[in-house]
Amino acid sequence: MGAFLEKPNTEKYNEHGAGNGLRYGLASMQGWRVEMEDAHCAVTGLPGELKDWSFFAVFDGHAGARVSDHCAAHLLECIMETEEFRKTCANDEEHLHVNSVKKGIHSGFLFLDHKMREIPEMASGEDKSGSTAVCALISPKFIYIANCGDSRAVLCSEGHPTFSTQDHKPMIPSEKDRIQKAGGSVMIQRVNGALAVSRALGDYEYKNVEGKGPCEQLVSPEPEIFVEKRDLERDEFLVLACDGVWDVMSNTDLCDFIRSRLFLTDDLENITNQVIDTCLYKGSQDNMSIVLVTFPGAPQPSPEAISLENQLEAALEMRVRELVESRDKIELSSIIQAMDDEDIPGLPPGGGIQAKRNFIKSVYSKLCPHGVDKVSLFLE
Ligand code: MN
């Protein structure tokens, strides 16, 4: 942990799709880290009788990618295999069965964590990896959100974040209480001074306290589960993302930013790429993954917004030219810094100048083909 590359790996993995009245786009990027340990899953139309249900998830691995990869491949089937889930879904009376669906999700998480432990590298202790998990099951009537760890889901309705999961950090009183009851301590905001997250799948070296159940260990695989009734008119979009995104953007920042992009394009992969690049430029040093799911009530591209963005880009281009011409040699980072200090109107809300860094760079590269563009790593 804590090892960084000399320059960030900005290559992105993308996916998109649509179904059940939903559209989704996702992006993930390794960034400054030496390893890529995030994983994700996106399925519209679940197998069997659940064709009108969809599933999305983000997993943020640590100490390796074994657990996050395994969870991305198996969490959904583990949930769907539970008795509670099977007997209750796929019927018109879903509202009568919300609690059973919740129980199924809960059991699915614990079942996966239990089964994964038997994988030979896990059982031998050779692989010490773990992973957060945040997922959403979307039925025609409800959104079920389950969270274990410090990745986060945020729902944006009528222009604002109306729901967010709570990050499971060791300092939270209820988490600290469980950790202490299991004989551990919280130091430097970490479980036993080492692990920065208090709930995760895997991390079996933190799950060996005798006489304690799976949800009473130093690190718990128990998901916190929330149910939101869908509102077809007000619900705009749902975001699932790992802490590499949330470290540098608040819930409101990210909702504002994504909304402003939805008025410009319906290319959701492109929007998630813009989020990740903006977070990198805002200083995120972590792997980043984001899944964006839009509902029928999401903003649509509008000619007015597109025209305003074109005006902004024209103004930015003019300012870059002025700055380049005003000096003998100027690095891209100095141009960004200068423009950041200028309070330029019309910058993307929640993103600011960093959200236009790629555009500014494209102008700069044309004017100064040999200019210096270095994204720097700010060590804490
Ligand atoms: Mn992370």
Image (cartoon, helix red, strand yellow):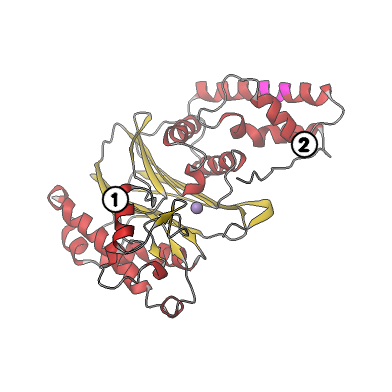
- What is the number of the mark on residue 6? none
- Marks 2 and 1, Cα distance to the nearest angstrom? 52 Å
Residue at (29, 56) in percent of width and height: 51
Q: Is residue 162 left or right of residue 245?
A: left
Q: Is residue 223 left or right of residue 269?
A: left
Q: Closest to the observer: 178 or 94?
A: 178
Question: What residue type is disc 2 on?
Answer: Ser
Camera-nearest label, 2 or 1: 1
Indicate the amino acid at tag 1. Answer: Ser
Residue 264 visible in this rendered orientation of the protein = yes
* Magenta span contains residue 27: no
Q: Is residue 49 visible?
A: no
Q: Which residues are magenta?
A: 315-319
Q: Which residue is mark 1?
A: 174
Q: Please, what is the dominant secondary structure of the magenta stretch?
A: helix
Q: Residues within 10 Å of mark 1 (few under 14, many from 20)?
A: few
Q: Look at 26% across and 36% down and name the residue there.
A: 231
Residue underneath mark 2: 365
Does the beta carbon at disc 1 come under 8 Å from ligand 1? no
Answer with the quarter of the image where residue 59 lies. Answer: bottom left
User: How far across and down, in percent of the image, does residue 198 sit?
Assistant: 38, 56
In the image, residue 230 above or below residue 102: above
Answer few, some or many: residues within 10 Å of disc 2's Cα (few below 14, many 20 plus, some between 14 and 19): some
